[in-house]
Image: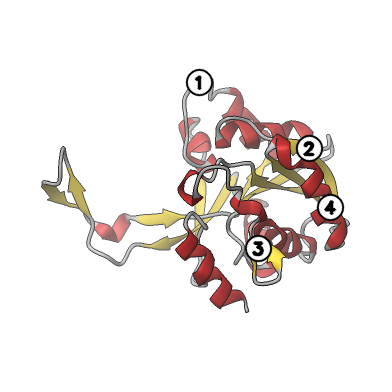
Amino acid sequence: MTTAIIVAAGKSERMGSGTDKAFLSLVNKPVVAWSLLAFERCPDIDRIVLVVRKDQLVASKAVVKMFGISKIFKIVPGGARRQDSVKAGLDACDIDTRFVVIHDGARPCVTSDLVSEVVKNVRRFPAVTVGRRITDTVKRVGKGVVVEATEDRERLWTVQTPQAFQVKTIRNAYKDLDKETVTDDCQAVERIGETVKILESRAPNFKITTVEDLQIAGAILK
């Protein structure tokens, strides 16, 4: 059993006060619906757990019904931090789940093929992520705006979602996390010494954080 956890419980602070970017209109659908549909159409996903803000539980059920998301297993409220929301999603997974695929609901350009690729690889590796090689020159900046050094970009990647895990691996990683904050789920797995494989994603798969990002995604998805 492979369960997807779609996390859409963020505060959307850079979008403006009171805005929930997961439910903003993107072309002809709410942002989160694009991810839901990609996972719904993926033959390698059996069930979906959707994690949203508590005040969006009713709206989420309406979106699921409107777009015919039949793989929805549960819709649960998220927590204060992203990792708290992921933990809520993990706790909601069925006992038969062997693999978990975690995805940010604010990445609407994800494709079913990309999801299948991470699922294929997580059968051989404890953890898998997608990302992109950094092509710009990278500077390390100290206090203020003074450059301290130029980093070797040959070994640097930016990381995206979906990220896939053997369920025992991700549960162990979260059990050991305690009060430490991580910025993605692979970081939690790295802390316990597990191997993470990275797959290069060449298609647009960025996270919507600003109004400008929403406009760019709209142009791509038309």
Q: Could you tell me which secondary element the residue under label 2 belongs to?
A: loop
Reading the image, the residue beneath label 3 is 25
Q: Residue at x 53, y 64 (%)?
A: 214
Estimate the x, y position of residue 205 in percent, counting from the top left.
53, 64
| Amino acid carrying mark 4 in the image | Ala
Front residue of this view, candidates 151 and 71: 71
Compared to residue 194, the image places residue 203 above or below, namely below
Question: Going by the picture, which residue comes out furthest to the top?
Answer: 178
Front residue of this view, candidates 62 and 116: 62
- How far is mark 4 from mark 3, CA to CA? 14 Å
Which of discs 3 and 2 lies nearer the camera? The answer is 3
Which is nearer the N-term, disc 4 or disc 3? 3
| Amino acid carrying mark 3 in the image | Ser
Which is nearer the N-term, disc 2 or disc 4? 4
- The answer to whether residue 51 is visible is yes
- How far is mark 1 from mark 3, CA to CA? 35 Å
